[in-house]
Amino acid sequence: MDLYLANCLGRIAPYYNLVLVVIVALLFIKLFTKQKKKIYLIPWKILFFAVIVYVIEEVLTVSAGLEVIPASSLILVNPILEMIIITAFIYVLLLQREYVLR
């Protein structure tokens, strides 16, 4: 029973991740279209870039799950995309730290 539940969650997780990231993208778009009143947006733009990279990674994962693309092609692509996301997060933190220290 537990193995079956884990297998089901593993198959459906990329789909609900994509739904949640669409909600996050809408919130980012709302943030970027607001009147800019001395808001430091550079870290948010980089964070939005990381979210877009995450969407690309999830779309590739869903495509591999549906056997549209071979799963073996993701062996190198997924770690590269995850490294881009982690690097963007670290850069956002460093930018925010510099902004706060000013």
Image: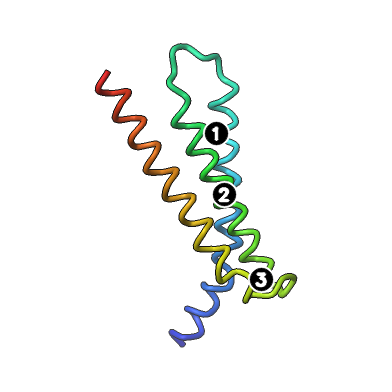
In front of the other: 35 or 16: 35
Picture coordinates of residue 97 (x, y %)?
A: 29, 30
Within-10-Å neighbours for mark 3: few <14, some 14–19, many 20+: some
Residue 53: numbered disc: 2
Within-10-Å neighbours for mark 2: few <14, some 14–19, many 20+: some
Picture coordinates of residue 13 (x, y %)?
A: 54, 65
Picture coordinates of residue 95 (x, y %)?
A: 36, 30
Front of the two marks 1 and 2:
2
Picture coordinates of residue 63 (x, y %)?
A: 69, 66
Three-letter residue code for mark 2: Val
96 up-or-down from 8: above or below = above
- First in sequence: mark 3 or mark 2? 2
Residue 12: numbered disc: none
Residue assigned mark 3:
64
Q: Is residue 96 left or right of residue 36?
A: left
Rounded to the nearest angstrom, the CA distance separating label 1 from label 2 is 14 Å
Q: Residue at x 55, y 67 (%)?
A: 76
Q: Residue at x 62, y 76 (%)?
A: 72
Three-letter residue code for mark 3: Ala
39 up-or-down from 20: above or below = above
Residue 17: quadrant of the picture: bottom right
Q: Are marks 3 and 2 in contact (CB under 8 Å)?
A: no
Rounded to the nearest angstrom, the CA distance separating label 3 from label 2 is 17 Å
Q: Secondary structure at mark 2?
A: helix
Residue assigned mark 1:
28
Q: Secondary structure at mark 3?
A: helix
In front of the other: 8 or 63: 63
54 up-or-down from 24: above or below = below
Q: Residue at x 75, y 71 (%)?
A: 68
Rounded to the nearest angstrom, the CA distance separating label 1 from label 3 is 28 Å
Three-letter residue code for mark 1: Phe
Q: Residue at x 49, y 36 (%)?
A: 46
